[in-house]
Amino acid sequence: MEMKKNVGRVTPEECAEIQALFERKNGLAELAKIVTADNTELYEKLVKDMGETGTKFQAWWDEKAKKYGWESHPKGNWEINFQTLEITLVVNEV
Amino acid sequence: MDSRIVMDNKIRQDIPLWENGVAKNITFIVTKDCQLACKYCYLVGKNSKERMSWDVARQAIDYVLSQKDYNQPSVVWDFIGGEPFLEIELIDRICDYIKTEMYRLQHPWFNSYRFSFSTNGINYHEPRIQHFIEKNRTHLSIGITIDGTEKKHDLNRIYKKSGRGSYQDVVRNIPLWLSQFPGGNTKVTISSDDIPYICESVLHLYELGIKDVAINCVFEDVWKDGDDVVFEQQLVDLADVIIDHELYQEHFCSFFMEHIGKPLNPDTDNRNWCGAGMMLAIDAAGNFYPCTRFAQYSLRNKPAWIIGNVKDGIDSNKLRPFLTLDRTTQSAEECVNCEVASGCAWCQGENYDAADTHTLYQRSTAICKMHKARVRANNYYWNKLFRKLELEGRREEFEKQKEKVKNPVC
Amino acid sequence: MMLQYLIILLDDMSVSYCHYENPSKVRRLIDLDVLKRGIVWGMKENLNIQFVYPDDELPQEYNEVIESIDHTKIKPQGQDEDADVVVLTEWNGEDVEVKSGVSYIIRTTREKLRGAMSSVHALLKKVNRLNIVMTDVEEFKDGDIDDYKALLEELKECLVDLYGQERNVQLNLLTDRLLLSQMNNCGAGDSTVTLAPNGKFYLCPAFYYEKPMDDVGGLDVGLNIKNQQLLRLDHAPICRHCDAYQCRRCVWMNQKTTLEVNTPSHQQCVMAHLERNASRELQSQLKRNGMKLANSLDIRKIDYLDPFNNYNQWR
């Protein structure tokens, strides 16, 4: 069963940051499916970029969770609504 | 922790356009062929010969990505036909090239793009389509067109060769589509013969699991005497079911928008309805158009409005009339002074095609009586819904959550 | 605006007095009956009639019919005995014999004008009014701005010099704007309509020569200009915000370049604004020289050459 709870909100600027990282992360992941190692110019750049973007993405959540003190749960994850800027805790209890 | 967009689940509203509609829209007319020959289709020049070549597609992408004045933060790469999925191999190659080039050029659009499709859904399940979807999963927007009940759908959406209805071949793919795109919406087109089936068709789509139904009357002059009366009654019947069964909580139908049917101020509400000119469409010959509706296969009476091509680029003079269009300059006095003007839509391509001269500036009024009928039914819907919500003490919550009406992208 | 003028092309080879080229190679004189009916139609509509003449002389009976009504004669050089407006085809200014009260037109490209500036100076010394019609507007590039500016500057200096000698010549490109407080455009299809030798009406002669199928009625069926509102200033989204009042706002060039009669091309706007700005400099200089300009409002400084680029401000 899924439980959802509104646990906070971020500023529009903060939302724009994570949205851009989210989009870039997805873009890189889908690009990785078609860029092969023999395309050395792009491949090396892409691998490095994926690492850096993933780190920034995680850092955003860590930083904001600390800043706002969002409620958490061992079986849960947070979700952000890019329209409303709201953070929801989603808990999956099987 | 991951993130995703979460939809409100209390009162269903129109889904906001991706990037609030500020994205640049680039449309590839990859083919003018389709398995179907829908009776209401505005594409009068469909054929199986005009298929886009890879060379034209690549030149178009190179041109678009080199434009410095395309400063929109996001882009929607749109693929239409005919039926775009007939050209899935080409589309796959185009999308791969777009992704690679946006990344290689460090184009800002790499961080904000979508590939968008309007499909008849017939070959949606095929492995080659599914492979493409899997490959581009997080950047896709796919709309399958299904018109409602089998009877209503098959009235118009028939196979080109056999004349057989296509409902069964589409509906079998709806569960797969909705499992991949849970917020998937469909676009329903209403022509004169469809009017008696509107209510049952919208409800049928809801039953299929499609929660957002974008529906509109065709802009062409097809309406018969009395159509508006039947249309109004269909919408009133639909309003009753939606409200009595509280379907409004999870479902949306674009016929019912709270802010339509009001007068518009000629000075402050003077924006053009249509986005033609902000978009760029490319056909198989490599010609550029302000919107697909200005390509020759869309036009009955007028010559194509070509604004350039992949070799020479865009002739900005031919875009100027689009970019300076406003509501009042193109409208007849009866429209400027209309008491129920808001929400009355127009298609710039149809205006051009139906105009008495070679102009964008003559707004077609063929839809007038249908809009007025819609406004009356819409008033009924909101009066009834507000009354119900007040009785249940939920009006305040509703008011807080509702969004203002937006111009749809056609 | 209501219809005020009727232009009657007396022949397919009537002289061009405006931006368009006349491609006709064969004479086709208007039927005498069509001419008579055209004149009667103009009288009934209370219009001023302007006859546009070909190179060759007209038969005497035509002249008699024409003289039956007040009118203006637009004639090519060489046929200019009793003309009101003369189109100069060869314009070595030193050689041209001019008459008082007659307006002269030269149709030219920038390149040709640059090479013949001394002839223009000579003409300006003699005529009351000279209209310079640029025939290469469509080819104008942003890289040509300085070149056209320099040409206008030279013409301006010539006018300052002549005004200093109290010779009050008019030059459309530079002096019209000084006297205008609102748009004064060509008015094709709005204040003016053209009757062609085929008995049909056109927005202007250019439409007849370029697209003879695009008539707007005829003597048999009457005048029928569809979407006539689009020919009015209030239905021209760019022009109604513009103060290059001297601009011809040529609807034929509009349709050719932007595909809309109510929308000017970038080229037409830039050239008109260079003329407007040169008029402003002329105005300043004449004022500095102590000249009093009747009915001349100050032309303000602006920072654009194409009002389209400002459209977000006036939308």
Image (cartoon, coloured by chain):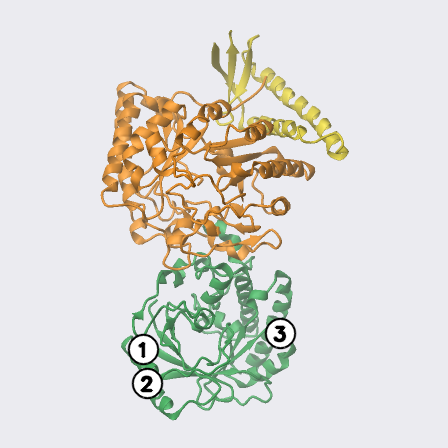
Chain colours: A yellow, B orange, C green
Looking at the image, which residue is at 71% across and 30% down? A46
Same chain? Circles 1 and 2: yes
Cα separation between marks 3 and 2: 41 Å
Label 1 vs 3, first from the N-terminus: 1
Q: Earlier in the sequence, mark 3 or mark 2?
A: 2
Residue C255 x %, y %: 47, 62
Q: Chain of mark 3?
A: C
Asked whether disc 1 touches disc 3, contact meaning CB atoms under 8 Å apart, the reply is no
On the image, the x and y values in percent for residue C140 come to 59, 65
Q: Position of residue A6 (x, y in %)?
A: 48, 16
| Residue receiving disc 2 | C69
Q: Which residue is at a point 44% across and 73% down the rendered structure image?
A: C205
Check if mark 1's residue and mark 2's residue have beta carbons within 8 Å: yes
Image quadrant where residue A74 sits: top right
> What amino acid does circle 3 point to?
Glu
Residue bearing the label numbered 1:
C42
Would you say residue C269 is visible in this rendering? Answer: yes
Residue B304, disc: none
Q: Amino acid at mark 1?
A: Gly
> Quick check: C90 above or below B171?
below
Q: Using a 10 Å C-alpha cutoff, classify the residue at mark 2 as few (fewer than 14 neighbours), some (14 to 19) or many (20 or more).
A: some
Find numbered disc 3 in the image and state the secondary structure of the residue it sits on: helix
Residue at the spot 34% in from the left edge and 73% down from the top edge: C4
Q: Chain of mark 2?
A: C
For the residue labelled by badge 2, is the local secondary structure a helix, a strand or a loop? loop
